[in-house]
Image (cartoon, helix red, strand yellow):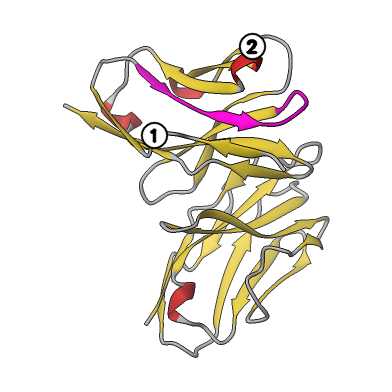
Amino acid sequence: AQSVTQPDIHITVSEGASLELRCNYSYGATPYLFWYVQSPGQGLQLLLKYFSGDTLVQGIKGFEAEFKRSQSSFNLRKPSVHWSDAAEYFCAVGEDYQLIWGAGTKLIIKP
Amino acid sequence: DAGVIQSPRHEVTEMGQEVTLRCKPISGHNSLFWYRQTMMRGLELLIYFNNNVPIDDSGMPEDRFSAKMPNASFSTLKIQPSEPRDSAVYFCASSHPGTTYEQYFGPGTRLTVT
């Protein structure tokens, strides 16, 4: 079975600083990879996805992620965070019909 | 589009009572998922419907939980009888034909069982 690991439970970043959230997966073939964001009190929203092709994918809200097969990673990045980016971020991999979810990383923004 | 609609947004009930959570998926979507989210266990898939048919209910915790989807625009998740350990946020999500991975989530129902 596939699994997804997000090693950081929470990360604190100053507003305007760059951000990288880590995600590692275990899967034999080329995975379908996703990042979702959950703002406080809300449901999850798809940020970006990787199916195939260019390993650097762009998403909404200025986020991007890079698929690195050699490292089994799909890290999420943003060059400059805003206070409104404070949320919980979930990495997921598609298996059959369902998503296998990571435990999430809570992003805290310092003013 | 109105997005996925869930009701109620908050539910407080006493142990032993029946609880019914409701979901209206996005029009045109043919897959529907019920999730439970807790601090301890994270996000858990409870049940998956495709074209109104339950495909996988292996995540339903026990017989106290049941879910129905009588038509393409409505689904319910029922807990009877409820227990304090059922306290969680319950999400409904839907996806359009062609992909079950791009899921649109509702705002959730926060359930507290005392």
Please name the residue shown 49% across and 90% down the image: B16
Q: Which region shows up in magenta?
A: A19-31
- Horizontal and vertical percent position of residue A60: 50, 23
Look at 78% across and 50% down and name the residue there: B30
Q: Viewed as shown, does residue B71 lie left or right of B36?
A: right
**On the image, numbered disc 1 is attached to which residue?**
A8
* Residue B111 drawn at (x, y percent): 44, 70
Q: Secondary structure at mark 2?
A: loop
> With B31 as the anchor, is A79 left or right in this view?
left
Amino acid beneath label 2: Thr
* For residue A8, above or below residue B33: above
Answer with left or right where residue A64 lies relative to residue A67. left
Q: Which residue is mark 2?
A: A55
Residue B69 is situated, as x and y percent measured from the top left of the image, at 75, 67
The chain letter under disc 2 is A
Amino acid tagged 1: Asp
| Earlier residue among tags 2 and 1 | 1
Dot 2 crowding, Cα within 10 Å, few <14, some 14–19, many 20+: some
Residue at mark 1: chain: A
Placement of B55 over or under A79, stated as above or below: below
